[in-house]
Image: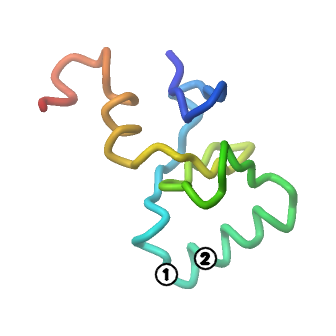
């Protein structure tokens, strides 16, 4: 199954390592990791960077997504019985 990250970008669900909110959880280690991804050219922005709401980390890339962490979580867990209850 795939996870839609916004625009026309999808990634295999089993490749997602973490989903982080852009506004919270930016401790020094996280900030350093995002800066390193940017410097290595593996940070990919989906849509307008000013509308970014989450980082989606995979084994190969880091995506800056306009979709919230909560919505991405619901999408990631859909199709898995018992994993998500609204």
Categorize mark 1 by other alpha carbons within 10 Å: few (<14), some (14-19), many (20+).
few
- Residue at the (49%, 64%) spot, across then down: 22
**Taking 75 as reference, is 65 left or right?**
right
Q: Where is residue 81 in the image (x, y as percent from the top left)?
A: 21, 17
Against 61, is 82 above or below? above
Q: Is mark 2 on a helix, strand or loop?
A: helix
Residue extending farthest to the left is 86
Q: Mark 2 points at which residue?
A: 31
**Taking 45 as reference, is 66 left or right?**
left
- State the image quarter where residue 5 is shown: top right
Categorize mark 2 by other alpha carbons within 10 Å: few (<14), some (14-19), many (20+).
few
> How many numbered circles does the render carry?
2
- Residue at the (87%, 61%) spot, across then down: 40
- Residue at the (44%, 70%) spot, across then down: 23
Identify the colour scheme used.
rainbow
Q: Position of residue 54 (x, y in %)?
A: 50, 54
- Quarter of the image where the C terminus is located: top left
Q: Name the residue under label 1.
A: 27
Against 77, is 56 above or below? below
- State the image quarter where residue 9 is shown: top right
Q: Where is residue 15 in the image (x, y as percent from the top left)?
A: 59, 33
- Residue at the (40%, 71%) spot, across then down: 24
Residue toward you, 23 or 29: 23
Residue 10 tag number: none
Q: Is mark 1 on a helix, strand or loop?
A: loop
Q: Give the Cα separation between the discs numbered 2 and 1.
A: 6 Å
Residue extending farthest to the bottom is 28
Residues at discs 2 and 1 in contact (Cβ within 8 Å): yes
Residue toward you, 52 or 36: 52
Against 43, is 72 above or below? above
Q: Position of residue 8 (x, y in %)?
A: 66, 25
Residue toward you, 44 or 1: 44
């Amino acid at each position: 199954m795939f996870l839609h990250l916004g625009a026309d970008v999808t990634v295999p669900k089993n490749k997602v390592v973490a989903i982080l909110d852009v506004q919270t959880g930016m401790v020094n280690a996280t900030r350093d990791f995002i800066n390193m991804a940017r410097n290595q050219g593996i940070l990919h922005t989906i849509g307008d960077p000013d509308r970014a709401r989450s980082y989606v980390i995979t084994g190969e890339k880091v995506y800056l997504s306009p979709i919230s962490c909560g919505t991405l979580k619901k999408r990631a867990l859909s199709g898995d019985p018992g994993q998500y209850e609204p």
